[in-house]
C-alpha cells in the first residue's frame, strides 16, 4: 500500500485551499509550488502584501471580543497579529481558507495557541492533541507498515479522559484520511495486568470511557508494543485481545513516549512521518516539525486538505 500516493490522490479530488503563513521559508515556498503543480490543493502563501489592512483590523477586533474575558488587552492582540500566523488562523475560522499548515519556523506551542484561540476546540472532543501518520517501508505490521501515532506533540501527561479523546480523534482521522478501519492499542510497558501501576489504571479507565464515547471502535489496552502489532506475540501474551496484534492506531501513555517513539521509528526505520496533524479543532490544521523537509510540507498539506473535505 503506497500510503503517501493515496493521500495525495485523495487530496486532489478535494482541491481545498490551504493557507501557509510561513511565506518566507524556502521549504514552504518550494512545497507550495509542488502542491499547485500537482493539483494537490490551492496553496495560499500568506505574504504580508496579501494581508488586507481592513480585514486585519477586523480580525484584531473580533479576536479581542472573543478573548477579552481572559484579561487580554488590545495592544497584546495587535502584537499577535504583527506576523501572519494569527491572520491565517482567522482566515480558516471564517472559511476563507479550508485549512492551515505552519510550524516550519514556529514552535508547536505557537501554532497550537493560534489555532486554539482562532479556530476553536471541537465541543465533543474538548481537547487539542496531535498525531502522525507513520509510513514504515518493508514493514508487515499495522496496515502494511502504515500507523497512526498519538499524541506525539501536545499533551504532556494525558489523564484517562484525555487519552480517550485522543483515541477517538485519531481513529476518526484514520478513517477519513486513510480510509482504514482503526484498530486501537493503548500502549504500556505491561500487557493486561503483567504489572501494576497508576499509569496502567489510567489506561483501564480510558478504555472504559472509550466504550461509552465511541462504542463501535475496536480498541484494547494496556498492551506492550509487540503484543499490539505482532500477531504471533499477541497470541502468546494475550490471545483474547480483540485487536489481535494488528493495531494500526497506537496511543502512547504520555508525550515523552510518543515523541521519542515517532522520532526513533522515523530515523531508524527510515519511515515517513506526516504531521503533527492537530486533532480536536473545529477545522483542520497541521503543525510541521521545524526539521521538516519539502516533502513533509506537501504531505501535511494533502492530509489537511482531505480533512477539510
Image: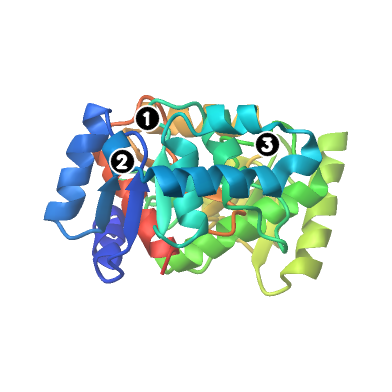
Q: Residue at x 20, y 51 (%)?
A: 35
Q: Where is residue 76 in the image (x, y as percent from the top left)?
A: 63, 27
Q: Do the residues labelled 2 and 1 touch (CB within 8 Å)?
A: yes
Nearer-N-terminus badge (2/3): 3
Q: Where is residue 255 in the image (x, y as percent from the top left)?
A: 64, 32
Label 3: how many Cα within 10 Å (few below 14, some 14–19, many 20+) = some
Q: Nearer the viewer, residue 201 or 107?
A: 107
- Direction from residue 12 to residue 17 in the image, left or right: right
Element at badge 3?
loop
Which residue lies under the disc numbered 2?
A: 297
**Looking at the figure, which quarter contains the C terminus?**
bottom left
User: Which quadrant of the structure image shows residue 296?
Assistant: top left
Tell how many labels: 3
Can residue 222 be seen in this snapshot? Answer: no
Q: Where is residue 239 in the image (x, y as percent from the top left)?
A: 67, 59
- Direction from residue 133 to residue 109 in the image, left or right: right
Q: Residue at x 62, y 36 (%)?
A: 154
Label 2: how many Cα within 10 Å (few below 14, some 14–19, many 20+) = many
C-alpha gap between disc 3 and disc 1: 20 Å
Amino acid at each position: 500500500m503506497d500510503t503517501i500516493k493515496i493521500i495525495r490522490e485523495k487530496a486532489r479530488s478535494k482541491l481545498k485551499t490551504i493557507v501557509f503563513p510561513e511565506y518566507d521559508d524556502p521549504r514552504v515556498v518550494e512545497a507550495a509550488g509542488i502542491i499547485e503543480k500537482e493539483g494537490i490543493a490551492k496553496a495560499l502563501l500568506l505574504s504580508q502584501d496579501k494581508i488586507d489592512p481592513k480585514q486585519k483590523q477586523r480580525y484584531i477586533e473580533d479576536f479581542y471580543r472573543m478573548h477579552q474575558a481572559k484579561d487580554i488587552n488590545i495592544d497584546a492582540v495587535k502584537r499577535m497579529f504583527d506576523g501572519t500566523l494569527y491572520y491565517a488562523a482567522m482566515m480558516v475560522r471564517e472559511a476563507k481558507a479550508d485549512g492551515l499548515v505552519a510550524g516550519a519556523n514556529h514552535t508547536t506551542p505557537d501554532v497550537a495557541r493560534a489555532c486554539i484561540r482562532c479556530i476553536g476546540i471541537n465541543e465533543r472532543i474538548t481537547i487539542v492533541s496531535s498525531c502522525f501518520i507513520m509510513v514504515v517501508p518493508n514493514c508487515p505490521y499495522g496496515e502494511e507498515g502504515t500507523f497512526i501515532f498519538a499524541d506525539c506533540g501536545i499533551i504532556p501527561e494525558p489523564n484517562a479522559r484525555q487519552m480517550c479523546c485522543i483515541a477517538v480523534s485519531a481513529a476518526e482521522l484514520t478513517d477519513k484520511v486513510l480510509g482504514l478501519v482503526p484498530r486501537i492499542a493503548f500502549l504500556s510497558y505491561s500487557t493486561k495486568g503483567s504489572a501494576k501501576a497508576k499509569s496502567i489504571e489510567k489506561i483501564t479507565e480510558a478504555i472504559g470511557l472509550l466504550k461509552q464515547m465511541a462504542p463501535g471502535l475496536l480498541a484494547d489496552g494496556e498492551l506492550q508494543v509487540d503484543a499490539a502489532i505482532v500477531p504471533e506475540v499477541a497470541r502468546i501474551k494475550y490471545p483474547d485481545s480483540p485487536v489481535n496484534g494488528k493495531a494500526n492506531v497506537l496511543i502512547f501513555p504520555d508525550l515523552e513516549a510518543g515523541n521519542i517513539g515517532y522520532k526513533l521509528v522515523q530515523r531508524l526505520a527510515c519511515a515517513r512521518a506526516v504531521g503533527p496533524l492537530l486533532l480536536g479543532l473545529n477545522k483542520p490544521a497541521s503543525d510541521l516539525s521545524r526539521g521538516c523537509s519539502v516533502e513533509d510540507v506537501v504531505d501535511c498539506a494533502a492530509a489537511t486538505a482531505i480533512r477539510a473535505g
